[in-house]
Structure formats: structure tokens, C-alpha cells
Image (cartoon, coloured by chain):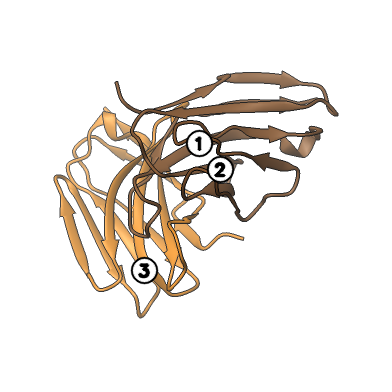
């Protein structure tokens, strides 16, 4: 079963525009991570936000977390063609041992030059 | 370049055959993971290992087995492949296996079972 559900499933924007995608999850979590996957490649870690954090920034990325709504958002500002990829959220369950992640189905982002 | 190496990159396999997917990391990470990725379903955890000599079951372990004889290698075996195991398989690692660590991924093995 999937813990995270992402919305939208696909997103097409012009270069320079912002891209926002959302992740909803079902059970309480310790942390939420966002990953990027370029076509035909493995996932690359982007950012981690802990359950006691509400917002985090990394370069052009901004992540928010609302534990009361069990949701997170990833904002990519001033998008570039190189940002074209699929983006996945992943959670690890509250009080669960280890680092076992549950992934959402992903958002496919196309940035048109 | 440090990272995870998976082999083969792709394979077509007849149903009923045995297949081992290889995964090697050179980062001296304690924890390693195997996921499968199917269209629209994201990644699902098959098996994991928090340290050499130990393994655990993930969300979808049936039909797969793993071993962890040393820190660097974490092979995944399909004892008797079935068409529903057609997927892209990713190996990943993290430093200690503690929660809240980013995972590092290989580029995957694309497996087709006919």
C-alpha cells in the first residue's frame, strides 16, 4: 500500500515559472523526504523535513509540512529545463525502527524551454 | 565516483528461471535496500538489511530473497521468476539505517519476465 499520494500526477510549465506539487500521507510520520528521478536513472535525494519542522529551503526548493493535514508540498522556483523529472515524496512511519521508506506515486514535471 | 552499482542494467528472462540482481556500494554504508518500481505505484520496498549479516522483509517480499554476507554487496534473487515480477529494480543504501537518513540509489535493473 502507498503511504503517500502525490498531486498532480503530471505538471507542464514554462521555463522560469514555479512548480508546486503536493504529497498527502495516511499515518503519522517521523520524517518526510523528497526525491527526484530523471528518466532512466535512480532517485536522488533533494530534501528532508522532520515532523517538528514546518518549512525548509534548499536553493530553489521550498518544502512545507503540515502534520495536522498529513500533507507536504514541494515548490521549485524559477524552473529550468533541467528540472524536468519525476518527483517523489517518501515517509518513514512514526516510531518505526530503521529507515524503511514508503514512497508516493510521483509527480512528472515537464519544464518547457 | 563513489556510489551504488547495479548489474545487469537490463535483462529479459523466461518465466520459471532463477535470476540474481547484483548491487554493490563503495560508501561503507551499513544499511541497504531493494525496491521495485512499477508505473504509477512509486517504489515499494522488497527487502532491506541494516547491517552485514542481517536482513528484513519489506512491503512486497514474496518471491524474492536477499543475503548480506558483507557490507558492500546485497544481491536480490528471484528463485523462479513470474511475469508479475516484471519491473524496474532499484538498490539503495544509507549510512546507518537509522530513521531520517537520505537514501542513495543505483540506476536500476530493468527486468522483463516473459
Vertically, is A62 above or below A81?
below
Horizontal side of residue B36 vs B65, given as left or right: left
Residue B112 is situated, as x and y percent measured from the top left of the image, at: 71, 26
Q: Chain of mark 1?
A: B
Q: Are marks 1 and 2 on the same chain?
A: yes
Q: Is residue B21 left or right of residue A37?
A: right
Q: Is residue A82 visible?
A: yes
Give the labeled residue for mark 3.
Answer: A30
Decide: few, some or many residues near mark 3? Use Cα within 10 Å; few <14, some 14-19, many ≥20: some
**Image point (51%, 44%), residue name:** B33
Residue receiving disc 2: B35
Quarter residue B85 falls in: top right
Provide residue B31's location: percent of width, then percent of height.
Answer: 43, 46
Return the chain for callout 3.
A
At 60% across and 54% down in the image, what residue appears? B58
Chain whose colour in the figure is orange: A
The local secondary structure at tag 3 comes to: strand
Residue sitting nearer the eye, A37 or B109: B109
As helix, strand or loop, the secondary structure at mark 2 comes to: strand
Q: Which residue is mark 1?
A: B91
Residue B42 in view, yes or no = no
Q: What color does chain B have in the rendering?
A: brown
Horizontal relation, residue B24 to residue B16: left or right: left
Q: Give residue A11's position: percent from left, percent from top.
A: 39, 45
Mark-to-mark CA distance, 1 and 2: 6 Å
Residue A39: name its quadrant. Answer: top left
Q: CA distance from mark 3 to mark 2?
A: 21 Å
* Image coords of residue A41 (percent x, y): 44, 28
Amino acid at each position: 500500500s502507498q503511504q503517500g499520494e502525490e498531486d498532480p500526477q503530471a505538471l507542464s510549465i514554462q521555463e522560469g515559472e514555479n512548480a508546486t506539487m503536493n504529497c498527502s500521507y495516511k499515518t503519522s510520520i517521523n520524517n518526510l523526504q523528497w526525491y527526484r528521478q530523471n528518466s532512466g536513472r535512480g532517485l536522488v535525494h533533494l530534501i528532508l523535513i522532520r515532523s517538528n519542522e514546518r518549512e525548509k529551503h534548499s536553493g530553489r526548493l521550498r518544502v512545507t509540512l503540515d502534520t495536522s493535514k498529513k500533507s507536504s508540498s514541494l515548490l521549485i522556483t524559477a524552473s529550468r529545463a533541467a528540472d524536468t523529472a519525476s518527483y517523489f515524496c517518501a515517509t518513514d512511519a512514526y516510531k518505526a525502527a530503521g529507515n524503511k521508506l514508503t514512497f508516493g506515486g510521483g509527480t512528472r514535471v515537464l519544464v518547457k524551454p | 565516483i563513489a556510489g551504488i552499482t547495479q548489474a545487469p542494467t537490463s535483462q529479459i528472462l523466461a518465466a520459471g528461471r532463477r535470476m540474481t540482481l547484483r548491487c554493490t556500494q563503495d560508501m561503507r554504508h551499513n544499511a541497504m535496500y531493494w525496491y521495485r518500481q512499477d508505473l504509477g505505484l512509486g517504489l515499494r520496498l522488497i527487502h532491506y538489511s541494516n547491517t552485514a549479516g542481517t536482513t528484513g522483509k519489506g512491503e512486497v517480499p514474496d518471491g524474492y530473497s536477499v543475503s548480506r554476507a558483507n557490507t558492500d554487496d546485497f544481491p536480490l534473487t528471484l528463485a523462479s521468476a513470474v511475469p508479475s515480477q516484471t519491473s524496474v529494480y532499484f538498490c539503495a543504501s544509507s549510512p546507518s539505517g537509522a530513521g531520517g537518513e537520505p537514501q542513495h540509489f543505483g540506476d536500476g535493473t530493468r527486468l522483463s519476465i516473459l
